[in-house]
Every structure is written in C-alpha cells, then in structure tokens.
Amino acid sequence: MSDASDNYASEMERLRKIESSDQFEPFLRMLAVGLAGFLISIYTEWLTPLVWAIYYAVAILMHRRYIATRKAFVSRNEVLVSAALFANLQIAFVWLPVTLFISPSRELILVGAVLIGTQLLFLVRRSDTLNIYNIIQIVGLICTSIIVFIGFLPDLETPIALTGAALALVGLNYYFWQSLRTARHMRIDQELSAQQAHQAKKIAAIGQLAGGVAHDFNNNLTAIMGSLELLQMANDLPDHQEDIDNAMVAARQAANTVSQLMLFARVEKPSLVTVDLREILDDLDKLTKRLIPTSISCDISVHDSGMLVRVDRHQLLSGLINLVVNSIDAMPQGGLLLIEARNVCLSQHEPLADGSKLPPGRYAKIAVSDTGHGIPAKILPEVINPFFTTKPVGKGTGLGLSMVAGMIREVRGGLSIQSEPGSTSVALFLPFADSD
C-alpha cells in the first residue's frame, strides 16, 4: 500500500464486487441449501440439516452485511474481522457435507460428495483476490481432507489403500490451490486491463482537448510576446518599462504552461535518446541550486554505475525539476530533500500512482523524497490527474505530475508515490536502454 497506515479499501471494494456480481445468487444459494437441508432432514429424520441451513443463511448475511458497511478507509483489523466471518461462512457450509461423506450410508456419502464438490467449484469461481481469503479456503480444504481421511481409516486396511487415499487427497489440495491461484491472477489482470483502458481513454480525451487549447493559445502568445519584445527594444515608453517587463514575465510563464500542455497532450513527440542517469542528475544539481533555499538541505546521490536509459532528456530533466519544486513548496519551514538513483529488480508487480502495476523486471529508479507536510491519503490517488493541484491560485497549474506520469508511461516505465505526514517520496521507474 502506498499509505503507511495500510488502507485496504481497494481490497474490500473487490470483495463487494465479488459478493454483488450476481445480486440474486446469494439468495439462490440460501434457498438451495434450505431445500437440501429440508430433504436431508426428511430422509434421515435428523434435525441437524435444518440447523445447518439456518446457520449457513445467517453466516452469509453477516459476511455480506459487514463488507457492505465498510467505509473509504479500511484497517487491517477490519480485514481480519471480514476474514473471520468468511471462515465462519465456510465452516457453516462444510460441516454437514463432511458428516454425510464419512457416514456409513452410500446415499449420504453421495450427497456429501456432491455438496463438497459444489463448494470447491464455487470457491474457484469466486476467485478472491485477498490473500487471507485464499489461505482460509486452502486451510479449510486441508482440514476437510484430514477429517475425511480419518473417517475412512477403518476401511483402508492395506498400506496401498492408505497411500492411495493420502495421495489422492494431496493431489486434490494441490490442484485446488493451483486453480485458486490461476483464477486470482486472471481476475487481477482483468481488472488491471480494464482500469488501464479506462485511464487511457480519459487521458486521451483530456489530451485532445488540452492539445487544441494549447495550439490556439500558443498562436496568441506568439503575437503577445512579439509585441512586448518590440516595445522593449523601442524603449519609447520608459515610464511603462516595468509594466512591460512584468507583462513579459507573465507571458513567459504562460508559454511554459502551454509547453506543459503540449507535452501532456503529446503534441510534441518525445525525442528518445540513450542517456546516463548520472549525467542527468549532475545537470539537475546545477539547474536547481538557485531554486533550493538555504533552509533546505539537499543530497543527490547515484548508488550504481552504468544506469543507461532511453528517454527524452529535456522532458526527464523538466519532470525532475518539477518534482524538486513540489518538494520545496511542501517544506516552507525547511527540511531535507533527497534525490537518489539506483538499480532495482522487481520480483513482483509494483503498484503505481495511476492504479496500474509495473511488471516485474530490472529498472533504474529515481526517488525524490522530502520531509514536508505530506499528501493526505484521501487525495493521494488524485494528485496525478491533469489540472489537480493543492497549491494556491497562481502557484500551480496541476499539470506537473500528470506530465511526469505521461512522460514515464511513454517509455514503458512507471511512477509511484508514497506519502505520510512528514515524508513524501515520488519514484520514477525507467527501463534500461538494453531492455527494449
């Protein structure tokens, strides 16, 4: 999680989607279990099947109700409570089928086997993405297998029979685990693809609008700046020279904003070259010396050599300067600014600021960290959205981080943000030039 306080809201939202993917399915399950309990009760003249049906219905309602009432922030303890309710739901269903399966009656053994098989298929179909839910399912099957094995021990009179039954149950557990694992990965990949497609459409629409606005505005700025430059050269209005200079500064700031818009909208195509990050950070040190006030200590370090990446040099420098300025703004009373570059090897998918995940592999990582006020957890997912800014009016356009994210995305890298009160770190992951 990007938030140090561990917000499990996204996992809980996945659970809500799993539970509500078919609105009537849980009620059909309760109806089916109720009918099965009624028929088994009539056949066996036992009361326990009716208790089983009621217990199962209550367990479903408790689990669904708890998940539905979780708020935007979900703590680890709430996830554990949800997992406990899910474990209770599994126990509520499986105890009667196991009892039937180890009974001496062939008819009840068949019913128990069908109910256990139905439950296994149901769990695979759910494809839970929360690891603790998968652990509960695996542990539940292992415990069920052990109970079944012990129940059939009197009938397993030879070593071959004992060995064969044990291997069959081990194989069942192994392939059930593999099925859960595969289903989980498929669900996560599907959600990730849908999220990336949605984000791409949104960015493309905003980019098209921004590109059109920037193009028209750039034409007007060219005329304005040309006229101001002629006035400065003519020097016919000495009394208004200060006003002309101020207008020129404002026009140049507007031109910089237009340049950012064009970069964001990809009107200006990146010029990709192979560069050494050590050289980039040396240039960054020179360009930002005058920007950093004396109240802020700055340390720039490169931990590894041979960090060659293929990027647009100007865009990367511009993006890093933007991150440095953001860190400076976050530390009005002073603090520590760290800029580090190192080689990293990701063994698993890395969560990114736009909600997507960076594939495993070797990357050059540049981290810009500060000891500023931090970014509130509730707005952290929005900070890379175009035109979103927390700065006062006139201090920022909200294009900086979105421009950096777009530039990194262009070279198949990624941007992640970790923040808490007193600490923020923005990391850029860049593929090595030899990985293309």
Image (cartoon, rainbow, N blue to C red):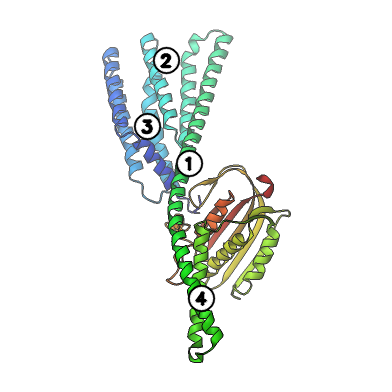
* Quadrant in which residue 359 is drawn: top right
Residue denoted by label 4 = 225
Position of 125 relative to 326 (above/below): above
Disc 1 and disc 3: Cα gap in Å? 31 Å
Rendered image: mark on residue 193: 1
Residue at 56% across, 17% down: 167
Question: Contact (CB < 8 A) between labels 1 and 3?
Answer: no
In this view, the mark in front (2 or 1): 1
**Mark toward the start of the polypeptide (2 vs 1):** 2
> Is residue 101 among the parts visible in the rendering?
yes
Which kind of residue does numbered mark 1 sit on?
Answer: Ser
Which kind of residue does numbered mark 4 sit on?
Answer: Met
Q: What x and y, as percent, mark residue 241?
A: 51, 87
> How many C-alpha atoms fall within 10 Å of the one at disc 4: few (<14), some, or many (≥20)?
some
Residue denoted by label 2 = 102
In this view, the mark in front (2 or 4): 4
Q: Secondary structure at mark 2?
A: loop
Residue denoted by label 3 = 89
Question: Contact (CB < 8 A) between labels 1 and 4?
Answer: no
**Mark toward the start of the polypeptide (1 vs 3):** 3
Q: What x and y, as percent, mark residue 190?
A: 46, 38
Position of 326 relative to 150 (above/below): below
Disc 2 and disc 4: Cα gap in Å? 88 Å
Disc 2 and disc 1: Cα gap in Å? 45 Å
Which kind of residue does numbered mark 2 sit on?
Answer: Ile
